[in-house]
Image: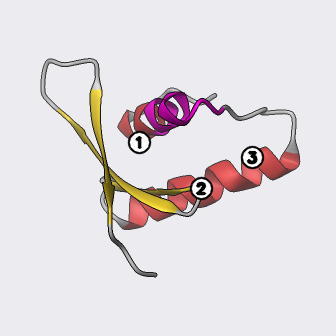
Amino acid sequence: MFKNDLIDKKINALLDFAGDSFDETKDEDMLFYHELRDFAEKHGGLLYFFNDETYLIINFIGEKNFLLIPVEYSL
């Protein structure tokens, strides 16, 4: 998994929270990753759409953990 920036770290936190993971060798997983990342980038790295749910993911300065909050959002 890509772990180069804050959005990737938040995606990894969301996957860990959901007990899921991406297989970089599967095209469908990589496509889903890019869709998830694109949505996050369009929403300032705060909102993530995963498994038909939208999450607000916040990080606090100096903390390793993230706060994941399910939110109401309509596309």
Q: Is residue 31 left or right of residue 75?
A: right
State the CA–CA distance, disc 2 to disc 1.
17 Å
Q: Quadrant of residue 36?
A: bottom right
Looking at the picture, which amino acid does disc 1 mark?
Ile
49 is within the stretch colored magenta: no
Q: Nearer the viewer, residue 2 or 49?
A: 49
Please state which amino acid type lies under the numbered disc 3: Met
Residue at 15 percent across and 30 percent down: it is 60
Identify residue for label 3.
Answer: 30
Q: Nearer the viewer, mark 2 or mark 1?
A: 2
Q: Specify start and end residues of the magenta stretch as a single range.
A: 11-20
Q: Nearer the viewer, residue 62 or 68?
A: 68
| Figure check: 72 above or below 12 | below
Question: Pointer 1: what residue?
Answer: 7
Q: Is residue 21 left or right of residue 44?
A: right
Q: State the residue position of label 2.
A: 51
* Image-based side of 64 in relation to 30, left or right: left
> Considering the numbered disc 1 on the image, is that residue within a helix, a strand or a loop?
helix
Could you say where residue 51 lies in the image, as x and y percent from the top left?
Answer: 59, 56
Check residue 14 for magenta coloring.
Answer: yes
Q: Residue at x 49, y 39 (%)?
A: 11
